[in-house]
Amino acid sequence: MAIKTKPNDNSLASSSDQESPLTFRNNPEVEKRLEAYKGANANDVEYYARVVKEAPDRARDMLLYKDMQKHESEMRLVEKQIPQAKEFYDAQSPEVQSRIDQRLDNVRPYYRDKAFVGEVLREMNRKNRQILTKPANGVAMSVG
């Protein structure tokens, strides 16, 4: 479940003086699936509860490790896609390259390759949609 923080109210205290409390979104469908999973894995639930209570730093690292594994898995796919993405990027007009570059301006270096592939895929989808919306030989295609 995602963590959602409340916006800081500067009239009460500065952000360095006090942190805002965490608020959590609840999704009943996810909660139901999670409860079923926890019921089937009671030993894991007990273990994780104990880790959180007795070794919170370890619990944090366990969560971060899972996130890191997911990121590394995604990056293996990105590494395979980079050559074709660069080829597509290099073949585009300066306007398209500029549009892609502009979207990548605020991306942290650690995530830049992944964001680059994502933006190239977005641009490719944009091109495909343009192709699909152009009438063939001036006549709109009918779906039958």
Image: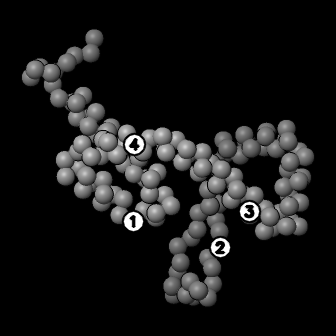
Which badge, 4 or 3, is on the more N-terminal residue?
Answer: 3
Q: Nearer the viewer, residue 90 or 67?
A: 90
Left or right: residue 62 compared with residue 113: right
**Crowding near the residue tagged with mark 2, few <14, some 14–19, many ≥20 C-alpha atoms within 10 Å:** few
Q: Which residue is mark 4?
A: 83
Q: Position of residue 118 (x, y in %)?
A: 41, 47
Residue under label 3: 61
Q: Residue at x 28, y 33 (%)?
A: 128
The quadrant of the picture occupied by the C terminus is top left
Q: Is residue 142 left or right of residue 11?
A: left
Residue 106's disc is 1
Determine contact: label 1, label 3, CB under 8 Å: no
**Given the image, on which type of amino acid does mark 4 rest?**
Pro
2 and 1 marks in contact (CB < 8 Å): no
Precedes in sequence: disc 4 or disc 2: 2
Name of the residue lying farthest toward the top: 144
Amino acid type of the residue tagged 3 in the rendering? Asp
